[in-house]
Amino acid sequence: MHRCRSLPGFRLLTASALILLAASAAHAGLGDLKKKIEKEAKKVDDAAGQVTGEAEAVTGQSSTGQADTEGEADADAGEGSAVSAAPAGQGGSLSTVSTKFDYVPGDSVILFDDFTEDELGEFPARWRLVQGTFEVAELSGERWLRVTSVDGRVRMKLPAMASLPEFWTLEFDFYSSGPTQQDLTVLGYAAGDNRVWETVFPHATAMVFRTGSIFSETPFEGTIAGRHHVMLMARGKAIKVYLDTQRMANVPEIEAASGMPLDIEFRLWSPAKPMITNVRFAEGCRPPKDVLAEGKLVTHGIHFETGSDVVKPDSAPVLRQIASYMQANPAVKLQITGHTDNVGSPESNLDLSKRRAASVARALSGELAIAADRFATDGKGDTEPMASNTKPEGRAMNRRVEFTKI
């Protein structure tokens, strides 16, 4: 991952006509709204199209089209992002995160894509185009998949399967500079392209989820425009959707008359040219009743900003599980071990992994009231990979925290 460099933010598309459209979008039909937006799209296309140009001008793109990566070797590629504004709703401490936010990512990564292996301006190799025009863009050293047409649809190139795994998770970062209205739709399709479910954001100031006759509309408590972290967690026919640290949908059973989903589609629709990055699709097993039943827990659910040892608030679900276990088993002590991928120097990775393990212990003792003397900490850097570092999926699995009974 590139180090964060100072860069002008995305230009807000503030044409008065678009603001009026955004304000009235909740009352307009999708077809009418689309016609109005298409009419205004040409007026704002040049402004939105400056994102890549501004980014390349500051990061120092070479004549070959590759961004300058000077200083990249010292940055760990860990969870999170080094770019621009943090996701709305990601501030605060673990204690401020609602207990309804219970997202835990799957551990067996099927696809991870931050678009660093693709050329700027090109369509990414690990995606399938369904409709529209997309390109890989860059801002502050971070790659994004950006739609350049008003409406676009893409799907991940997943391994052939009869359906998605019984237990799976999907998470990604989403950005739209605004005005925003229905910029993002994520859809699950069964065989024959039969739509099983869809979730839409924003719908006015809410997120919508639909499956069959079931419809939910949950107001979002943060700022609509900007960067957000979107998560979906499926357990058989049950599915939950999260935005930043807020749970937006909780459906106990999707309508699957046409079969279970086997494909997931991303629809980006707006003249503001919304974008996605850090896409992680993983298989996850059924959550155990005893998280340390086998004496060890390996988790990818504790998150840090790139190159940082500060525990992010969205790590709360896993840390609360550990805290509950420690409270129920007062004689147990744990070894906390941090691991990184191999991006960066071995020395910096080792130091970072040790600092992250220590930060996890401090979070458990300081915010979740577990005695500090019940933890020992260590870090292994990139010396004990659990998967190959040659592919993004392997690197994503290697960035982890382990808890072991002492």
Image (tube, rainbow, N blue to C red):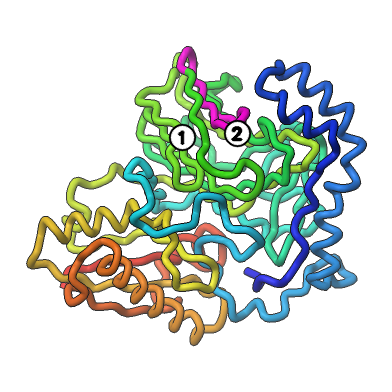
Q: Residues in magenta?
A: 199-214
Does 229 appear above or below 205?
Answer: below
Does 174 appear above or below 72?
Answer: above
Looking at the picture, tell me which residue is in the foreground, 23 or 156: 23
Whichever of callouts 1 and 2 sits on the residue coming sooner in the sequence is 2
- Quadrant, the C terminus: bottom left
Q: Position of residue 194 (x, y in %)?
A: 57, 19
Residue at image coords 47%, 40%: 242
Does 187 appear above or below 7?
Answer: above
Q: Quadrant of residue 240?
A: top left
Looking at the picture, tell me which residue is in the foreground, 178 or 130: 178
Amino acid at circle 1: Met
Q: Are marks 1 and 2 in contact (CB under 8 Å)?
A: yes
Residue at image coords 36%, 66%: 401
Residue that badge 2 annotates = 201
Apparent side of residue 141 relative to residue 300 in the rendered image (left or right): right
Residue at image coords 24%, 78%: 376
Q: Main secondary structure of the magenta part?
A: strand
Amino acid at circle 2: Phe
Q: Position of residue 81 (x, y in %)?
A: 58, 62
Q: Circle 1 — which element?
A: strand
Residue that badge 1 annotates = 248
Answer whether residue 176 is magenta in the image: no
Assess disc 2: are there few (<14), some (14-19) or many (≥20) residues with their C-alpha within 10 Å of its C-alpha.
many
Residues at marks 1 and 2, CA–CA distance in whole angstroms: 10 Å
Residue at image coords 92%, 37%: 43
Q: Circle 2 — which element?
A: strand
Q: Which mark is residue 315?
A: none
